[in-house]
Amino acid sequence: MKPIRLATLILAVAAFGCSTLEISTDYAPGTDFSSYKTFSLKQGAPPKNQIAAERVANALTAALEAKGIKRLPEGGDLSVYVHFQAGKETQVNTTGYGYGGWGGWRWGGYGGMQSTTVTEIPTGMLVVDLVDEAKDVAVWRGIAKDQISTSATPEERNQKVNEVFAQLFAGFPPK
């Protein structure tokens, strides 16, 4: 393999491996998901950003309609609640420079310098609950957690939300 191709492959793998998106789903065993044909959105824990709420509602609607479940203004087979939670994660990075390495000394050991930076990274979590409207019981829950980019354009934010819901509903309906 030529060095340029190898470097490109390594960079592509590294880019996909660095994703911070965490997805988890759960469902009520024995649920007949094929019986659900419609859904309606209900008020969950809202975000502080109404634009983000609309973006999420649109992406959620597209994801469920792609699975054959149509959105109704009220009275769907499923009530869908979306809960937003914002937070922060602390990231600590320490870099060191030193000398040594001979006679039992380690690099970065004796005589070196270290620098530590602490960064607060904004995070967001979406919890999506699907509730059987007739029985008033939860049948499916999906959770997506990721870092929030403070510099993304509206187009990049739309793309990210669509990607999140595509992954969140990738295995839906459960078999």
Image (tube, grey):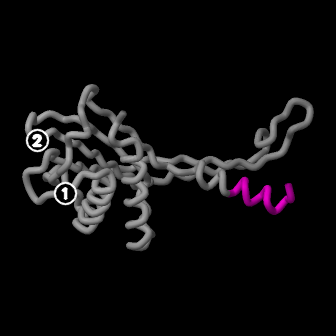
Q: Hey, which quadrant is residue 130 in on the image?
A: top left
Query: At numbered mark 1, what does the secondary structure look like: helix, strand or loop?
Result: strand
For the stretch drawn in magenta, what is the main secondary structure? helix
Residue 16, how many percent across, how many down? 59, 52
What residue sits 86% from the left and 59% below the top? 2
Quadrant containing the C terminus is: top left
In the image, 108: left or right of 32?
A: right
What residue sits 35% from the left and 52% below the top? 124
The residue type indicated by label 1 comes to Arg
Quadrant containing the N terminus is: bottom right
* Tag 2 and tag 1, C-beta contact below 8 Å: no
What residue sits 41% from the left and 46% below the top? 170
Residue 133 magenta-drawn?
no
In the image, 68: left or right of 113?
A: left
- Which disc, if any, is residue 117? none
**Residue that numbered label 2 is attached to:** 133
Q: Hey, which quadrant is residue 122 in on the image?
A: bottom left
The Cα–Cα distance between marks 2 and 1, rounded to whole angstroms, is 14 Å
Q: How many marks?
A: 2
Residue lying farthest to the top in this orientation: 30
The residue type indicated by label 2 comes to Glu
Residue 46, how many percent across, how many down? 19, 55
Q: Is residue 140 above or below residue 58?
A: above
Residue 9 magenta-drawn?
yes
Q: Residues within 10 Å of mark 1 (few under 14, many from 20)?
A: many
Residue 38, how many percent across, how many down? 18, 51
Q: Hey, which quadrant is residue 171 in on the image?
A: top left
**Residue that numbered label 1 is attached to:** 71
Range of the magenta residues? 1-11
